[in-house]
Image (spheres, rainbow, N blue to C red):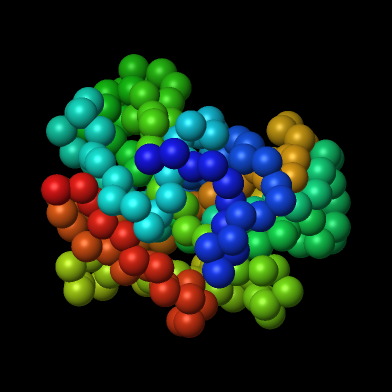
Amino acid sequence: MAYPSHQNLQQQALAYPVGKVVCVGRNYAAHARELNNPVPAQPLLFMKPSTALTDLSQPFPLPNHGARCGYELEVALLIGQTLTRADASQTLAAVAGYGLALDLTVRDVQDQLKAQGHPWELAKAFDQSCPLSPFVEASAIQDPTQLRLQLQINDTVRQDGNTADMLLPIPELLAYISRYFTLQAGDVVLTGTPAGVGDLQPADQLRLTLAEQYVFTAQVAA
Ligand code: ZN
């Protein structure tokens, strides 16, 4: 439902505004291949508005438009300081927290938009299209370029990836984004999904695990 503020692991509100969500597509080669997409020469960026965010701990509905709503598990970065045309070596210092998000995608609508060469917002930027976890403080993450991310649905592992397999690692991804879009405190960056995407069904039970130790549960509304 509403997403009043970003939260830490203790479910306390963090003192950042809730900003935009910048996302990258096809940042893991195995996922690009599973959707029969070419591995891009340049990162494929898109955005979700702040109204796409929803608290992962609350059951989220599947959208009414389209027939197939897909999940994409992604590492989410909470931006803590402004990044504009930043050098990759400076970007990690601007990340305040690490979490997990679902980049919900109405796959049949996306397929139609892709075929027509149209933007993807109807498929990816709708209300509650970005269930988002609380954030692990950045200082607790030793190496964000080697972070395991896992998604179980109804006790079956569907996605199991590692940020080490990103085509554009997190420091370079943030530098690339900041060449075009200034990132501000409270913005969120979704870093792409590993292989294993599929569709969600009402009442699915989800278990998201970051770095093998931070576990978040979620539920699709019945
Ligand atoms: Zn995605």
**Which residue is depicted at the point 54% across and 50% down?**
190
> Is 8 situated left or right of 51 in this image?
right
**Image quadrant assignment for residue 196:** bottom left
Question: x, y (%) of residue 82?
Answer: 81, 44
Locate residue 139 relative to residue 199 in the image: left or right.
right
Residue 41 appears in view = no
User: Would residue 97 be visible to someone looking at this image?
Assistant: yes
* Figure label count: 0
Q: In which quarter of the image is residue 64?
A: top left
**Residue at 65 percent of width and 62 percent of height:** 97
Residue 108 position in % (x across, y down): 22, 32
* Residue 84 picture quarter: top right
Above or below — where is 170 with respect to 199?
below
Left or right: where does residue 79 sit relative to residue 63?
right
Residue at 36%, 24% in the rendered image: 122
Left or right: 183 with respect to 126? right
Q: Considering the image in quadrants, where does the N terminus appear? A: top left
Rendered view: 104 above or below 93? above
Q: Pinpoint residue 57: horizontal percent, then vertical percent.
A: 37, 58
Residue drawn at the location 49% of the way across and 42% of the way down: 3
